[in-house]
Image: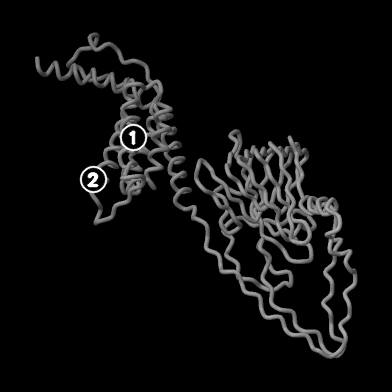
Amino acid sequence: MTTNSLVRAWRTFRVWRRTRPFWGGLFTVLAGLEIFATTQGSLGGLSFQMGPTGFLSWLIPAILVTCGLLMWFTPAQRLFYAIVAAVTAVFSLIGVNLGGFLLGLLLGTVGSALGFAWTPVAPAPDASAVDEEEPEPASESDVDKTREIPTQLHAVTVALLSLAMVAVATLHGGTPAHAAPCKPGATPAPTPSGTPTPAPGGDDDEGGGNIITDILEGIGDLFGIGGDKREAAPTPTPSGGKPPAPPPTCPPSGGGEAPGGGESDEQPILTRVVAPPADITAVNRVPSILTGSKLTNYNLEYHGVTDLPLRGGGTMKVLWFNMSKAVTDNFELKPAVPNNRRMSVKANPLTVDGRVRFFTPRFTGKLLGLNQVYTPTSPPPLPPGIPVPVLPIVFTDVEIQLAYVDCVTLTAKDLLNRP
């Protein structure tokens, strides 16, 4: 009688197990328990916790255990619980003891993948209609093996995606260190002999007489409209001797080589470098500053790093982005105008649409509440040349050094210009 009860209980358990993602829930529960166990001790004195008083050391294991149990008792919502468990397991890498010293991370990744990939099978035949002492027919195992093939493929796919997220979070470095700004050299004293030759132009070349002209020229420099209307005035040269040697100058703040063609100490570019667009002849040496409370990018594509030519010579290294549409809330643009001044253009919102391209030497903002800083030496963690479809990429609290932008349509609501 006891043996029959055990056999009946085992078969009942098997029927229950086959109607829900049992192994996915089990691995997820084990992941939560393993991560919690690592918070109660240390590995050779090594311990890593985040949050006030180790709050995440309780929260992350509780979420994993809860998701594993819910996969068992409410299998209809297994997809949602598997996604939550996968995200939590990945976050445990930086949240609690490196994901339970990687073991809890692997258990959570495998468990969430199995839970996501599980599909219900046909109900087993009634146990009362089968002789209790006969072994299971071979056809049943064949059916199980046939049904396990797509499940295994789904599990491998989800596991690879989760591990890819871990690799991106681990390998993407922070903002690189930058060298201290170089100090300008001493200006040589001019030779007292002779009379200096006056520079042509006069006061009209200073560009401070007409504020409307300054505003239009500032916008024109940003969008690549117009040419070089101001030439650098020649340095007064003494008539009685050789001209003094020019003092050493720092390279442009936007990156690239110095205007004189000299070499500069640049950090290596660890991403795709592409040729600059042929239709961009020259851009302003001082990038405009774009700020906004939210920037929504549709079909965002990181194209690579390129060198844009500067007015007056030299180049500037910039990040090249393409997208189909971008919407900026609380938009403000501060283009540079002559005499080291900036104007202000505000709109809420501002929309650029149709074959949008923008080039920036520095992009800062928040993605999912995490600070992001992108430069040519620290590019975004996106594969170059592949757009992100369907889902828009939303940044908040953005500040962009905008070197150049163009589009088909620009729509600005409540546009306000202020010099």
Secondary structure beneath label 1: helix
Q: Amino acid at mark 1?
A: Leu
Q: How would you rate the neighbour count of disc 2 (Cα within 10 Å): few for under 14, some for 14-19, many for 20 or more?
A: few
Residue at 34% across / 41% down in the picture?
A: 56
Q: Is residue 142 above or below residue 377?
A: above
Q: Quadrant of residue 180?
A: bottom right
At which x and y percent is residue 164? 46, 44
Residue at 43% across / 46% down in the picture?
A: 166
Q: On the rendered structure, is 122 left or right of 333?
A: left
The quadrant of the rendering that contains the N terminus is top left
Q: Is residue 182 above or below residue 213?
A: below
Between residues 272 and 348, which one lies in front from this camera angle? 348
Residue at 60% across / 39% down in the picture?
A: 388
Q: CA distance from mark 2 to mark 1?
A: 17 Å
| Residue designated by label 2 | 40
At which x and y percent is residue 310? 75, 62
| Residue designated by label 1 | 64
Q: On the rendered structure, is 326 left or right of 241?
A: left
| Figure coloring | one colour
Q: Amino acid at mark 2?
A: Gln
Q: Which residue of the protein is positioned furthest toward the top in this rendering?
A: 129
Q: Quadrant of residue 255?
A: bottom right
Q: On the rendered structure, is 147 left or right of 103?
A: right
At which x and y percent is residue 288? 71, 53
At which x and y percent is residue 59? 33, 37
Q: Give me the disc on residue 54.
A: none
Q: Is residue 130 above or below residue 279?
A: above
N-terminal-most mark, 2 or 1 = 2
What is the number of callouts on the image? 2
Asked if the residue under mark 1 is in contact with the one under mark 2, i.e. CB atoms within 8 Å, the reply is no
